Amino acid sequence: MKKQLLFFYMTLAFFLTACSNSDDDMIVQESPVTTDVEAFFARALNEKEFLNKPNGFFSLDEFSSLSNEHPVIIRSINSREELEQAYQGELALPEIDFSKITLIIGLTNSRSSAETLGYTRLLENHGNYDFQVVIYKDVNPTGVWSLCIEPILFWKAYPKFPTSRLTATRIIKEVIRN
């Protein structure tokens, strides 16, 4: 019986090792933040005001520089000093525990009214991080959209991580919405 149990556990261990793929990306879970932090970013990253008064985290020049080769701009912030340097607006900065938190603040664009922010996520693979910005593109054949290019601003908080190995990727997912 002990030999059978040992054989079972060895087989299970082999199976789990053989089936695990160390190259798979792991999704990093977001960190909770206070309502003050949420309220600050809701106001500081107001897309409707951005084009009229871009004095927060990004400039009109940065917005204009977005292209197919560089479709996303992100700022990774690991300290109060970095936050103060990145933010050029007039709102009071919230208290954030940067000993535990890394902020990612970003800018991309919608290339027509058919494109909206779907979701964002941070993937980790052996110490390398990829922040993915997923844009939903409505491909409903009966839809009508304007060709207006608009800013899409976003932010997320994650457990502190070294941002020197951080990249950003924009992904378009075609969807049909009514």
Image: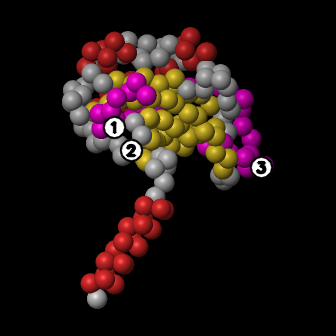
* Magenta range: 136-165
The verdict on residue 85 being magenta is no
Q: Position of residue 62 (x, y in %)?
A: 55, 15
How far is mark 2 from mark 1, CA to CA?
7 Å
Q: What residue did someone put label 2 on?
A: 28
118 horizontally vs 44: left or right: right
Cβ atoms under marks 2 and 1 closer than 8 Å: yes
How far is mark 2 from mark 3, CA to CA?
37 Å
The verdict on residue 151 being magenta is yes
Q: Is residue 96 above or below residue 80?
A: below
Q: Nearer the observer, disc 2 or disc 3?
A: 2
Of helix, strand and loop, which one carries label 2?
strand
Q: Position of residue 109 (x, y in %)?
A: 59, 28
Q: Residue at x 72, y 29 (%)?
A: 147
Q: Residue at x 67, y 39 (%)?
A: 114
Identified by mark 1, the residue type is: Tyr
Q: What residue did someone put label 1 on?
A: 158
**In what quadrant of the picture does the N terminus appear?**
bottom left
171 horizontally vs 3: left or right: right
Q: What residue did someone put label 3 on?
A: 142
| Foreground pick, 105 / 91 | 105
View extreme (right): residue = 141
Q: Within 10 angstroms of label 1, few (less than 14), some, or many (20 or more) residues?
A: some
**Disc 2 or 3, which lies upstream in sequence?**
2
| Foreground pick, 1 / 68 | 1
Identified by mark 2, the residue type is: Val
Q: Residue 57 lies in what quarter of the image?
A: top left
